[in-house]
Amino acid sequence: MQIDEIQRNVATALAEDIGGGDLTAQLIPSNAMVTAQVISREPAILCGSAWFETCFHQLSSHIAIHWFINDGDVLQPNQILCEIEGNARAILTAERSALNFLQLLSAVATQTYQYVKAIEGTRSVIVDTRKTLPGLRYAEKYAVRCGGGTNHRIGLYDGILIKENHIIASGSIEQALNNARRIASKNTMIEIEVETLDQMRQALSAGATMILLDNFELETLHEAVTLNQRFHQPAILEASGN
């Protein structure tokens, strides 16, 4: 887990919420101590405990948090997730940001889990995209893993996904793939997006090892799988959209 990334996420969230100071927290005596619980309202996959804890610990290192469940576990309605003990002002100030992280990441993990269960028993896997909230990519991709999904490329730096605009600029599918192979390191993922079966044939003929089938109807997806199996070296296929 990338501790520095979590620290940055939390620092940004707290700065956004607290600004020049938590005015409402001043209603509470500065030395007041409290014990609190977080209780679930519906079934979910828990995710985000590290971000949750960091929200409190950035305000007070003396706040104690005891978990009864781990990230990736299934939780039920009215289940106690954790207990928190410490300074009342610090706990109340950190509460909203902490819950925002826990709720958002648990939601991503839960939705992912539902998709993973839907394809259970097949050889397919659920992968994520770069369509994440700005600044929270690592957090949301961690949530996908907690839900049983798999991370695709993290950013533009660790994989090549050739899309329509890249193909047009390169002149052809074959040329785009050749350009990608020239700049890619040995273990860099190279994937190409196609919109028709004809484009898929071109990609396979050009030696594509990973093909994204963009917005294919279900019947066309079946045809694509059959077409792929006819080639000596079939590509890994990804279905995206529709």
Image (cartoon, helix red, strand yellow):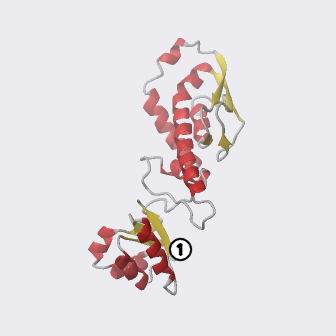
Q: Is residue 89 above or below residue 220?
A: above
The answer to which image quadrant residue 162 occupies is bottom left
In percent of width and height, residue 147 lies at 59, 51
Q: Is residue 165 above or below residue 40?
A: below
**Residue in view at x 57 percent, y 29 percent:** 59
The answer to which image quadrant residue 48 occupies is top right
**Residue in view at x 59 percent, y 15 percent:** 30
Q: Decide if residue 215 is in sight here.
A: yes
Query: Label 1 amino acid?
Result: Asn
Q: Quadrant of the C terminus?
A: bottom left
User: Few, some or many C-alpha atoms within 10 Å of disc 1 (few <14, some 14-19, many ≥20)?
Assistant: few
In percent of width and height, residue 241 lies at 41, 60
Q: Is residue 181 above or below residue 80?
A: below
Identify the element where label 1 is drawn. Answer: loop
**Residue in view at x 47 percent, y 72 percent:** 222
In percent of width and height, residue 192 lies at 41, 72
Task: Please give the residue where the numbered disc 1 appears in the rendered image.
Answer: 187
Q: Nearer the viewer, residue 28 or 84?
A: 84
**Residue in view at x 53 percent, y 74 percent:** 187
The answer to which image quadrant residue 54 occupies is top right
Q: Is residue 41 left or right of residue 65?
A: left
